[in-house]
Image (cartoon, helix red, strand yellow):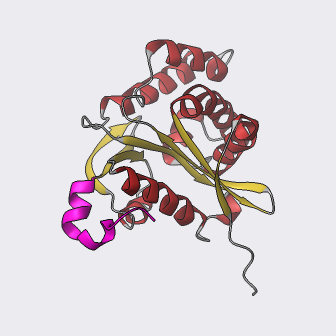
Amino acid sequence: MEKGPDPLIRDLDSADLPAAAAVVGRGMRDNPLHVRAFGDDPARREARLTALFTALLRRQHLAQGVILGASVDDRLVGVCGMIQPGRCRPTLAQTLRVLPTLVTGRGFGLTLRVVNWTSAWPRRDAGDPHWHLGPVAVERHLQGQGIGSLLLEECCRRLDAAGADAYLETDKAENLAFYERFGFQTVGDDIVQGVTSWFMVRTIRTLVSAAPARFAGPA
């Protein structure tokens, strides 16, 4: 089969946010924690995740970091968010603004699950200055074709050029080996809403020690 064109990796702007949120909603619809938080109905999960990331991408990532997008034939197929150091823990006001989008009219149980989830991950956030990665998502039917790798390569290129550490969370065990390919190491895990979450860091100190020639200068 003939290989299609490589995705174009670029910074997204405000006009791209609806499409970016939709990619995240579709691409992360079946994550274990999202199933636990939003229920068994795939269509409802996708809609609620899209609503969540519509708010988060607009109110947090765009104002406080970078949103990378992967496009094929002008169609967005992958997203990687990067939040700058010191800005990744949402304030109470930010959390309160996002929650009504998700839970209005949908019951106390859902509200409680979302609050528990969105408060549990920030408590485990790395203490040292770092860029926070997430969300990282690719369209479901295109996963496993290298789009996520291209996004992470660009993300890590920027981290290396800046001499910056990075941190992320994942609730999918199969993601651990993927992120390890880019220098991330697991530093802990926890049970959140009955689902295991893993916490990973990528430190420049460790990378320089392991492969000093890699840091001759920015690409």
Q: Is residue 148 visible?
A: yes
The residue sitting at 69% across, 43% down in the picture is 20
Q: Is residue 209 magenta?
A: yes
Q: How many marks?
A: 0
| 14 up-or-down from 210: above or below | above
Q: Is residue 211 visible?
A: no
Closer to the camera, 2 or 42? 2
| 149 up-or-down from 60: above or below | below
Quarter holding residue 206: bottom left
The residue sitting at 33% across, 48% down in the picture is 164
Rendered location of residue 105, percent (x, y): 69, 15
The answer to whether residue 75 is left or right of residue 180 is right
Closer to the camera, 66 or 33? 66
Rendered location of residue 123, percent (x, y): 31, 29
What residue span does the magenta drawing correspond to? 203-219
Quarter holding residue 107: top right
The answer to whether residue 120 is left or right of residue 158 is left
Instruction: Give the main secondary structure, helix, strand or loop, of the magenta stretch.
Output: helix
Rendered location of residue 184, percent (x, y): 33, 57
The residue sitting at 65% across, 38% down in the picture is 45
Residue extending farthest front? 217
The residue sitting at 23% across, 63% down in the picture is 208
Q: Is residue 50 magenta?
A: no
| 94 up-or-down from 23: above or below | above
Closer to the camera, 40 or 60? 60
The N terminus: image quadrant: bottom right
Residue extending farthest bottom? 1
Residue extending farthest left? 209
| 208 up-or-down from 121: above or below | below
